[in-house]
């Protein structure tokens, strides 16, 4: 049996997915790992635990097929991680992941400076605590011994690749999320490196997302090895968000990908670098002359999970919650949730933002709370999407993530955005996108585009109701944002995807 293996390094687990030549999932396996919070607002992972999880999930898939090694292996990974490595190639820190907020004060300071604005224009990465740029400044100011001792500063994918090949390389897609990489010339930015007092030697060699190396069996963890056959081509691939657009087919200039899982994002593909005067959106490299423009939200389905488990303390299933929400009219009878319970990234880029239920009256019920929660999550995504709609004419939205299993939520998205929403048969879109890059690198014919399984047409009357609510949503946040961050307690950290 011929198959193609995609390995997706996520925030909470590593997943290996075997695809057929037609792009169908043959089998998949995942292995989770811990997120550590040694101090409030810190979020870290043990890089060796992540490496082991990638190896275990891949070996489980290969073993289950009991045939031959995959025709290729390609990687997808989350962005914005940072590991300091010493001269003996040992980690000096854990992997400081995107959800880490220790550099919030530094980011706030840099964002208002001329340097911060110039750095954004060069890199396409909003100045925020998530970015390795701000994490490096934090290390330099707060852990100078570690900063000075470090020989390399790398991401989790670079760590895995070093363990496999003994060399430090980074693809342009992941590099473009560091805040250190010039998005226009696709190389490390000399001015930013000088600002940090580091050199290109402190960073990995930049390669194309199609860069391939033949696998060799040097990767060992606790006496175990990858079951991949020596000589199998390994393609470095790109970042999970960019590859998700590719995997879902949302690469048409008139298509937008919106995903809502634990967190959420809205992204479009462009053939040119585009930044935002308000630094509200990112611009990352996808491949060749294609770029991903968009924004990510911290507050996706994790907010509904919080409502269910912490506030309502209900044993009802999510299906039952959706049924309750469906019984309430759009707009939740003037009840609005600002869902920023985990701070927020795009478009407000405020790590100290907070959540608020606004407009409660004596007639509101549990069902109103649920629907307002779902609407608030979509409003947060729409606040990103509407910026993208200023850049391109979008005629369809490709929906992915756990929320795509709810017809109520999908119709809500169509009505709020006033755009048709499509749900395709594409599964494991980031891993699939990685495999598609691998097939392109090896000149293997592309997968056929996945069939659209369902569509949701917008209701104009509902859209008008939602727009009135959304305008209030924005006014409420703008009016309260200063009060919400006054004397705040550091945010608790939760596993996010």
Image: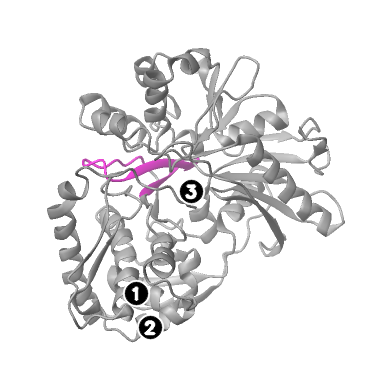
Q: Which quarter of the rendered picture does the N terminus lie within? A: bottom right
- Which image quadrant for residue 197? top left
- Residue at point 68%, 45% (across, down): 53
Image coords of residue 257 (percent x, y):
42, 59
Residue 380 shows up from this direction: yes
Queried whether the magenta region covers residue 273, the answer comes back as: yes
Real-space Cα separation, disc 2 to disc 1, in angstroms: 7 Å
Q: Which residue is mark 2?
A: 324
Q: Which residue is mark 1?
A: 370
Q: Earlier in the sequence, mark 2 or mark 3?
A: 3
Image coords of residue 70 (percent x, y):
78, 50
Q: In screen coordinates, is 334 left or right of 232?
A: left
Q: Which residue is mark 3?
A: 242
Residue positioned most to the bottom: 327
Magenta-drawn segment: 272-294
Asked whether the beta carbons under mark 2 and mark 1 sit within 8 Å of each other, the answer is: yes
- Residue at point 40%, 35% (across, down): 131
| Colouring rule applied to residues | one colour
Image coords of residue 30 (percent x, y):
67, 55
In this picture, is 409 found above or below 99? below
Mark 3 burial class by Cα count in 10 Å: few <14, some 14-19, many 20+ = many
Mark 1 burial class by Cα count in 10 Å: few <14, some 14-19, many 20+ = many
Real-space Cα separation, disc 3 to disc 1, in angstroms: 31 Å
Which of discs 2 and 3 lies nearer the camera? The answer is 2
Queried whether the magenta region covers residue 455, the answer comes back as: no
Q: Which mark is residue 225?
A: none
Image coords of residue 334 (percent x, y):
18, 75
Circle 3: element type:
helix
């Amino acid at each position: 049996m011929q198959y193609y293996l995609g390995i997706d390094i996520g925030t909470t687990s590593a997943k290996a997915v075997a695809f057929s030549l037609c792009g169908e999932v043959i089998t998949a396996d995942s292995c989770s790992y811990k997120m550590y919070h040694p101090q409030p607002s810190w979020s870290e992972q043990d890089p060796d635990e992540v490496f082991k999880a990638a190896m275990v999930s891949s070996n489980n898939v290969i073993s289950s097929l009991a045939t031959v090694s995959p025709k290729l292996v390609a990687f997808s990974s989350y962005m914005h991680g940072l590991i300091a490595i010493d001269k003996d190639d040992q980690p000096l820190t854990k992997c400081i992941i995107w959800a880490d907020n220790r550099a919030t004060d530094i980011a706030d300071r840099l964002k208002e400076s001329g340097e911060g604005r110039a750095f954004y224009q060069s890199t396409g990465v909003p100045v925020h605590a998530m970015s390795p740029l701000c994490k490096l400044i934090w290390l330099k100011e707060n852990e100078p011994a570690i900063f000075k001792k470090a020989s390399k500063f790398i991401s989790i994918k670079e760590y895995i690749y070093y363990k496999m090949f003994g060399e430090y390389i980074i693809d342009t897609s992941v590099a473009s999320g560091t805040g250190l990489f010039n998005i226009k010339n696709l190389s490390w930015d000399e001015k930013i490196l000088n600002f940090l007092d580091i050199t290109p030697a402190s960073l990995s060699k930049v390669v194309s997302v199609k860069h391939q190396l033949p696998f060799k069996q040097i990767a060992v963890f606790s006496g175990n090895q990858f079951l991949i056959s020596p000589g199998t081509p390994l393609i470095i691939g790109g970042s999970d968000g960019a590859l998700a657009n590719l995997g879902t087919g949302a690469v048409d200039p008139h298509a937008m990908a919106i995903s809502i899982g634990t967190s959420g994002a809205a992204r479009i593909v462009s053939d040119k670098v585009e930044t935002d005067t308000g630094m509200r959106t990112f611009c990352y490299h996808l491949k060749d002359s294609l770029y991903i423009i968009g924004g990510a939200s911290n507050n996706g389905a994790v907010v509904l999970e919080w409502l269910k488990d912490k506030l309502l303390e209900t044993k009802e299933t999510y299906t039952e919650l959706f049924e309750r929400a469906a019984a309430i009219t759009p707009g939740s009878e003037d009840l609005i949730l600002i869902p920023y319970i985990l701070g927020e990234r795009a478009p407000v880029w405020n790590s100290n933002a907070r959540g608020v239920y606004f407009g409660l009256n004596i007639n509101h019920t549990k069902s109103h709370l649920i629907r307002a929660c779902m609407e608030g999550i979509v409003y947060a995504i729409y606040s990103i999407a509407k910026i993208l709609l200023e850049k391109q004419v979008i005629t369809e939205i490709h929906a992915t993530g756990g929320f795509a299993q709810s017809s109520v939520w999908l119709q809500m998205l169509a009505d709020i955005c006033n755009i048709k929403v499509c749900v395709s048969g594409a599964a494991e879109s980031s891993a699939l996108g990685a495999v598609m890059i691998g097939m392109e690198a090896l000149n293997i014919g592309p997968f056929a585009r996945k069939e659209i399984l369902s569509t949701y047409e917008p209701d104009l009357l509902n859209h008008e109701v939602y727009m009135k609510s959304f305008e209030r949503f924005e006014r409420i946040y703008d009016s309260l944002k200063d009060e919400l961050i006054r004397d705040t307690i550091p945010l608790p950290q939760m596993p996010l995807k």
